[in-house]
Image: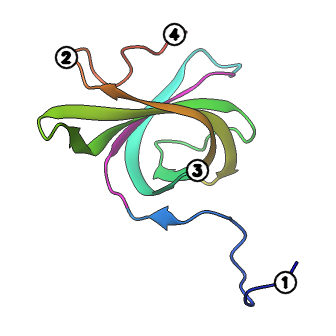
């Protein structure tokens, strides 16, 4: 295996500077519902970096819902819904490694409409 170049980049996927509203909910939490909203800073196939209202607990599962900038068929608004673990957490920024995701049409009930599985 050859190294294609010296780089300090640890992630294997590209990130894109997407700025959209995100709503989050900590799934595995000792406190009663840890929910909040923020703004995505960048998104890649392996993870998402976003602003938070408070420091999120490391290693916990989080559900994220992001208003997606593209529309289905050019007309139907979408949301990106993902589940993943918090892999980095600071006072007002968190990174989540995406474990599963799907695109849904955005309904009138808001981003977290299908929060309970």
Mark positioned earlier in the residue sequence (4 or 1): 1
- How far apart are the alpha carbons under marks 2 and 3? 27 Å
The answer to whether residue 103 is visible is: yes
Query: Which residue is denoted by mark 2 in the rendering?
Result: 108
> Element under label 3?
strand
Q: Which residue is more in the foreground, 104 or 19? A: 104
| Residues at circles 4 and 1 in contact by the CB criterion of under 8 Å | no
- How far apart are the alpha carbons under marks 1 and 2? 51 Å
Seen from this angle, which residue lies furthest left? 75
- At a point 53% along the width and 42% down the height, the residue shown is 54
Residue 47's tag is: 3
Mark positioned earlier in the residue sequence (2 or 3): 3
The boundaries of the magenta stretch are: 18-28
Mark positioned earlier in the residue sequence (2 or 4): 2
Residue 59's tag is: none
| Residues at circles 1 and 2 in contact by the CB criterion of under 8 Å | no
Residue 102 vertical placement versus 48 (above, below): above
Q: Which of the image's four quarters has the C terminus?
A: top right
> Element under label 1?
loop
Query: Which residue is denoted by mark 1 in the rendering?
Result: 2
């Amino acid at each position: 295996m050859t190294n294609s170049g010296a780089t300090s980049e640890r992630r294997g996927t590209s990130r894109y500077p997407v700025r959209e509203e995100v709503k989050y909910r900590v799934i595995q939490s000792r406190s009663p519902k840890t929910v909040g909203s923020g703004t995505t800073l960048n998104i890649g196939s392996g993870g998402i970096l976003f602003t938070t209202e408070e420091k999120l607990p490391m290693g916990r599962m989080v559900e994220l819902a992001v208003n997606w900038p593209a529309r289905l068929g050019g007309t139907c608004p979408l949301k990106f819904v993902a589940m993943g673990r918090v892999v980095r957490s600071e006072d007002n920024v968190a990174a989540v490694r995406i474990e599963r995701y799907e695109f849904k049409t955005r309904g009138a009930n808001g981003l977290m409409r299908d929060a309970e599985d």
